[in-house]
Amino acid sequence: MEKVFNKLVRDDIPDIIKQNGETPVTRILNDDEYKEELYKKLIEEANEVIESKDSNSTLEELADVLEVLKAIAKLNNSDLNDVIKIGDQKRIKRGGFEKRIFLEKNIK
């Protein structure tokens, strides 16, 4: 039975498919396709975080989001440490989300 995925997968997935006695059909994405598919993957993984049912599955899905973020940073000639540094700077300037503030409106 053929399963169609048409999505970016982790590097070892084709080998895992082979170990299961199946034949993966793959291709290597060009730079523009890779960027587009990474953004799609980020949305997919973020939705899986939202849909997770317990702390363990939430952490698993957050790890997937993290892996995608690493790849996007690398695509932009950077790394996760640079992203964290920028995030820290933004937190100093604008705060984080610890206070759970929900802005309803702004009146002039």
Image: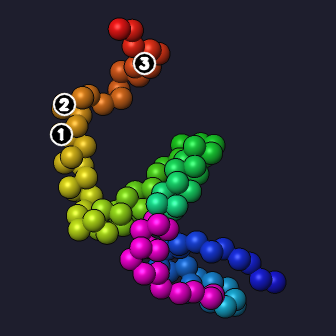
Residue located at (67% from left, 85% from top): 20
Q: What residue type is labelled 2?
A: Lys
**Residue at mark 3:** 103
Residue 83 spot, x, y in % from top left: 25, 52
- Mark 3, Cα crowd under 10 Å, few <14 / some 14-19 / many 20+, is few
**Residue at mark 2:** 93
Residue located at (44% from left, 14% from top): 105
CA separation in Å, label 2 and label 1: 6 Å
Locate residue 35 relative to residue 78 in the image: left or right: right
Q: Which amino acid does label 3 sit on?
A: Leu
CA separation in Å, label 3 and label 2: 18 Å
Residue 64 visible in the snapshot: no
**Residue at mark 1:** 89
Mark 1 or mark 3: which comes first in sequence?
Answer: 1
Residue 49 spot, x, y in % from top left: 54, 47
Locate residue 59 relative to residue 78 in the image: left or right: right
Residue 104 spot, x, y in % from top left: 47, 15
| Residue farthest toward the top in the current orientation of the protein | 108
- Mark 2, Cα crowd under 10 Å, few <14 / some 14-19 / many 20+, is few
Q: Give the range drawn in magenta.
A: 24-38
Asked if marks 2 and 1 touch (Cβ < 8 Å), the reply is yes
Name above or below for residue 56 compared with residue 78: above
Q: Which amino acid does label 1 sit on?
A: Gln
